[in-house]
Amino acid sequence: MDKIRVGIAGLGRMGAMHAQNIFHQIPEAEITAACSIVPAELEYARDALGVKQIFSDYDEMLEKSDVDAVVIVTATALHAQHAIKALQKGKHVFVEKPMGVDVAECLEIERIVNEHPDQVFMMGFMRRYDPSYVYAKRKIMEGCIGRPYLVKATGIDPISSVPKVLEMEKYSSGLFVAMGVHDVDLIHWFLESRASTVFATGGNYGFPEFGEYNDIEVGCALYELENGTMGMLHTGRTAVHGYHIETEIVGTEGSIRISPVPQKNLAMIYGKDGVTQECVAEFRERFQAAFLAEMVEFFDCIKTGRKPGLKAADGTSSTRVVLATKESFLKKQLVTIAH
């Protein structure tokens, strides 16, 4: 096949990163169209990426451009409708998380995906493509830790991001929904089951301003999965040392810990403060390789005609669970999750 012609919708920090990966790292794909409501983003597409077909309207891009695939990095509330429109136009679709803002949107995407079996649909759960997580999954499948029965997932944004987060709080879906979906997907992936019950709690200890939006700065949740295994989630917004992502998978014969120290690299600094190690500052730095690997997977699936292991149903399940987690926190009670 000739180069896969790509239309990218949204060129903010995530969209620009995906565009750079496609432009510089994926020779079988070419960005031929770009869409954004921000003029500066369209200028970037034209000047930095050489994109000739520029649109401020998504529907117009679908109608007038000659793309084979669409990469959707638009506002969260638009993900589902943009993905559905592209699928119905016969395009392959990559959509950033979340797949939809509620379960109904996710189920509608599932239905449309099933109606278009010849098209590739993939969502941005990039942690499944991170080299360390891929390695851990392989070791688990090899029996390295026996039967896995517990995943402890920690995801905490740097405290430096709090002012920006507070600016956007009135548009936020809340801590558990905004930040927990990646960790929930990992819990499902590693334990090969779905959460069936959840109890969640949390609070504001350094930033009571979050309470003005009925939200929290840190939260914890305990899950029981359908196969009897367990998941634990610790998520928050106030890591003083950087961007902290840590996952531990516990089994009957051992455990695997991923990033107990979210190290920037393997360098150790020996100085007046003792022996120190710098940490990654934000998510794009930590998951740089994963973001590229997931995009490589998307275009390889298009080229070879196969389907990614990550299914639309996975997005629906994770959405159900984080919404139930938020419900549990708000009601202060155990919530049963019906899949």
Image (spheres, rainbow, N blue to C red):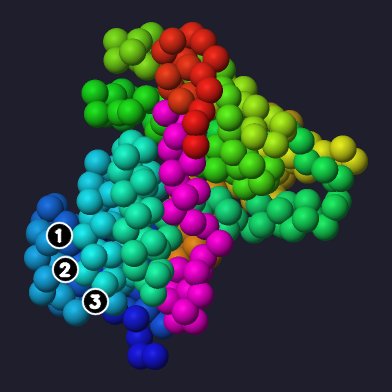
The image shows residue 24 at horizontal and vertical percentages of 40, 74
**C-alpha separation, residue under disc 3 versus residue under disc 2:** 8 Å
Residue 302 falls left or right of residue 241: left
- Residue shown at 33% from the left, 28% from the top: 173
The amino acid type, in three-letter code, at marker 3 is: Val
| Disc 1 target residue | 58
- Is residue 248 visible in the rendered image? The answer is no
Indicate whether residue 82 is drawn in magenta: no
Q: Looking at the rendering, which quadrant does residue 245 occupy?
A: top right
User: Which span of residues is magenta-colored?
Assistant: 296-323
Whether pointer 3 and pointer 1 mark residues with C-beta atoms closer than 8 Å, the reply is no
Q: Earlier in the sequence, mark 3 or mark 1?
A: 1
Q: Dot 1 lies on which element?
A: helix
Badge number at residue 62: 2
Q: Main secondary structure of the magenta part?
A: helix
The amino acid type, in three-letter code, at marker 1 is: Tyr
Depicted 59 relative to depicted 38: above or below: below
The image shows residue 232 at horizontal and vertical percentages of 64, 27
151 vs 117, nearest the viewer: 117
| Disc 3 target residue | 67
Badge number at residue 104: none
Q: How many marks?
A: 3
- Residue shown at 24% from the left, 29% from the top: 171
Q: Dot 3 lies on which element?
A: loop
209 vs 79, nearest the viewer: 79
Depicted 298 relative to depicted 184: above or below: below
Indicate whether residue 322 is drawn in magenta: yes
Whether pointer 2 and pointer 1 mark residues with C-beta atoms closer than 8 Å, the reply is yes
The image shows residue 276 at horizontal and vertical percentages of 69, 36
- Is residue 97 visible in the rendered image? The answer is yes
- Residue shown at 43% from the left, 44% from the top: 316
